[in-house]
């Protein structure tokens, strides 16, 4: 069995990868998702060409399986981080895979905001920028939180897969010590830790969403 | 004319191009709305009244024609100018459309934030408005904690925040029960009288028009069928749509042909006296009440009744003659006249 130290270090690596990738993915995916909604032909600022182009790009990135995508973009990963393996390097493919996913999550959350509320804001002379930041995002906040919990769990899943291509973290432990050396126990422990982390992320996200939502009182 | 025109709509057409082809929503609309009045626009659903009200603040851009608000032709304005002029028009909706994640107070502050008013000033103004709509104690409640009527009051306060000249009401009472409807209408009337705001009311309910409007436009199949004072339209409806709206469906199949009927209208000038009973006693002629929709508002009678006159022509004439001496509007006709 591995020492507690190694488990702790790999757990930390996983959390580091997941949290940084989620943050960067949201920095890209949130504006992308908002742009998808706003530029829709029924959106507040229709831009059909831009909307179609963004939609196609998002769909392409979403349809490539994560491991293949990670291998495909190795040159880009190397260009950005200077290496192709390790936790920091993995942040690049994780972000490239997660940002379009998050864009779609954001898009569907924002589309839940009833049109009447947007129309009311327009009747008050709000411009599209004000509608996005003062109406759409705040009104969709609980749904965005739920989407956040789902996204972070998805990214965690990707990060575990990254173990196969030298990604570091719990996935690597499961692959190197468990899978390659036929050590079933280590694999099991790695999986259990991942499951527990998923539960925590999911539960915290859902609770936060519920707490934030002023509709259910 | 003592009043001046605040909204002028000229030759307005609106068509929507959709998957099902081109749909004409509004066709050749001409309308003048006077400063300070409460103007009603009534029609069945799908007649185009919601599109018409959205053309007044350019939430919908007309396909043809012009809309002039306070002397400014909306079609000639730049985007920023249009956003600016929208602040001179408040709007309330059937579904209230409050921001669910903001308190009542924050909702009322919203249009002020949009207009760039400082936070303290906005909050002060919002509290004044809550006072006006009678919800001072609900400032920190979220919409989900308020009843429909209270939500509509918050929406009214929000619409008034930027001190508009015009208030557009799109089916504002259609989601409310009759008692709440009456209290919201009373509030609108009060706002019209105390603040001098022109109010444009869209509805499918004649009762709403009767209760607060001075003038009314009846819209039918994308066109204006009739415009006039509420009294005029209600006592002498000209168009078939006006008749349909004034005489509700219920009694239509009950009127037998070949009999004489009369309609009496109580327009608030007559005190609430038992006119029909008195007539029967006076003329010794029995009548059937085929339809009645009357109300006692502050001791005055409002509403209408349709009577089937006696078969005996002399008795019928006597009954009519009696009614004409009373302070009510009387109109005689056969079954077709009232269906």
Image: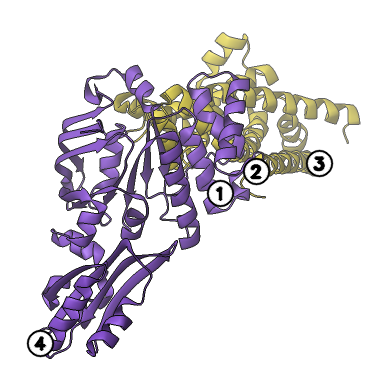
Chain colours: A yellow, B purple
Q: Position of residue A68 (x, y in %)?
A: 52, 29
Q: Position of residue A72 (x, y in %)?
A: 50, 22
Q: Looking at the image, is mark 1 or mark 3 nearer the viewer?
A: 1
Judging from the image, mark 1 belongs to the subunit labelled B
Q: Position of residue A114 (x, y in %)?
A: 46, 43
Q: Residue at x 53, y 22 (%)?
A: A28
Could you tell me how far apart the alpha carbons at marks 4 and 2 are, in whole angstroms?
63 Å
Q: Are marks 3 and 2 in contact (CB under 8 Å)?
A: no
| Marks 3 & 4 on one chain | no
Is residue B143 found left or right of B291 in the rendered image? right
Q: Report the residue marked by disc 1.
A: B150
| Marks 1 & 3 on one chain | no
Q: Looking at the image, is mark 3 or mark 4 nearer the viewer?
A: 4
Above/below status of B322 relative to B204: below
Query: For the residue carrying disc 2, how many other residues have a C-alpha within 10 Å: few (<14), some (14-19), or many (20+)?
Result: some
Secondary structure at badge 3 equals helix
Q: Earlier in the sequence, mark 4 or mark 1?
A: 1
Q: Number of marks in the image? A: 4
Q: Report the residue marked by disc 3.
A: A189
Judging from the image, mark 2 belongs to the subunit labelled B
Q: Report the residue marked by disc 4.
A: B313
Identify which residue, A27 or B145, lies in the foreground.
B145
Q: Earlier in the sequence, mark 2 or mark 1?
A: 2
Judging from the image, mark 3 belongs to the subunit labelled A
Any mark on residue B138, and which?
A: 2
Q: Looking at the image, is mark 4 or mark 1 nearer the viewer?
A: 4
Identify which residue, B51 or B176, lies in the foreground.
B176
Quadrant in the picture for the N terminus of chain B: top left
Q: Earlier in the sequence, mark 4 or mark 2?
A: 2
Identify which residue, A154 or B334, lies in the foreground.
B334
Q: Looking at the image, is mark 3 or mark 2 nearer the viewer?
A: 2
Identify which residue, B282 or B252, lies in the foreground.
B282
């Amino acid at each position: 069995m591995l020492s507690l130290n190694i488990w702790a270090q790999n757990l930390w690596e996983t959390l580091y990868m997941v949290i940084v990738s989620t943050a960067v993915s949201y920095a890209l995916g949130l504006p992308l998702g908002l742009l998808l909604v706003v530029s829709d032909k029924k959106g507040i600022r229709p831009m059909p060409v831009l909307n179609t182009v963004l939609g196609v790009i998002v769909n392409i990135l979403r349809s490539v399986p994560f491991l293949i995508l990670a291998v495909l973009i190795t040159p880009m990963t190397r260009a950005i981080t200077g290496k192709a393996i390790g936790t920091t390097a993995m942040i690049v493919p994780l972000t490239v895979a997660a940002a379009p996913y998050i864009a779609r999550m954001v898009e569907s959350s924002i589309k839940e905001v009833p049109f009447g509320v947007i129309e009311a804001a327009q009747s008050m002379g709000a411009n599209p920028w004000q509608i996005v930041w003062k109406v759409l995002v705040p009104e969709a906040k609980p749904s965005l939180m739920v989407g956040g919990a789902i996204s972070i769990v998805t990214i965690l899943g990707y990060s575990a897969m990254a173990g196969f291509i030298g990604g570091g973290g719990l996935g690597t432990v499961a692959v190197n010590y468990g899978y390659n050396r036929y050590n079933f126990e280590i694999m099991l422990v790695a999986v259990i830790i991942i499951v527990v982390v998923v539960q925590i992320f999911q539960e915290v996200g859902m609770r936060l969403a519920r707490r934030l939502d002023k509709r259910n009182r | 004319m003592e009043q001046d025109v605040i909204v002028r709509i000229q030759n307005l057409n609106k068509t929507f191009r959709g998957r099902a082809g081109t749909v004409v929503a509004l066709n050749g609309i001409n309308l003048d709305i006077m400063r300070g009045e409460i103007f009603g626009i009534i029609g069945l659903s799908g007649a185009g009244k919601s599109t018409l009200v959205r053309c007044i603040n350019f939430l919908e851009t007309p396909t043809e024609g012009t809309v002039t608000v306070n002397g400014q032709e909306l079609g000639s304005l730049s985007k920023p100018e249009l956003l600016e002029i929208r602040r001179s028009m408040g709007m309330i909706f059937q579904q209230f459309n409050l921001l669910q994640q903001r308190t009542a107070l924050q909702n009322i502050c919203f249009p002020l934030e949009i207009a760039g008013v400082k936070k303290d000033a906005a909050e002060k103004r919002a509290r004044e408005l809550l006072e006006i709509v009678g919800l001072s104690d609900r400032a920190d409640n979220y919409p989900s904690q308020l009843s429909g009527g209270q939500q509509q009051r918050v929406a009214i306060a929000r619409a008034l925040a930027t001190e508009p000249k015009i208030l557009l009401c799109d089916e504002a009472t259609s989601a409310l029960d009759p008692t709440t409807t009456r209290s919201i209408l009373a509030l609108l009337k009060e706002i019209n009288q105390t603040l001098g705001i022109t109010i444009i009311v869209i509805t499918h309910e004649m009762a709403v028009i009767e209760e607060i409007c001075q003038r009314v436009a009846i819209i039918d199949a994308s066109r204006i069928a009739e415009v006039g004072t509420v009294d005029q339209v209600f006592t002498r409806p000209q168009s078939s749509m006006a008749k349909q709206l004034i005489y509700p469906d219920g009694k239509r199949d009950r009127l037998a042909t070949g009999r004489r009927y009369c309609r009496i209208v109580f327009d608030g000038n007559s005190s609430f006296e038992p006119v029909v009973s008195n007539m029967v006693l006076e003329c010794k002629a029995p009548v059937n009440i085929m339809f009645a929709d009357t109300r006692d508002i502050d001791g005055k009678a409002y509403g209408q009744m349709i009577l089937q006159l006696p078969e005996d022509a002399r008795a019928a004439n006597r009954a009519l003659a009696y009614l004409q001496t009373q302070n009510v509007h009387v109109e005689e006709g056969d079954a077709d006249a009232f269906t």
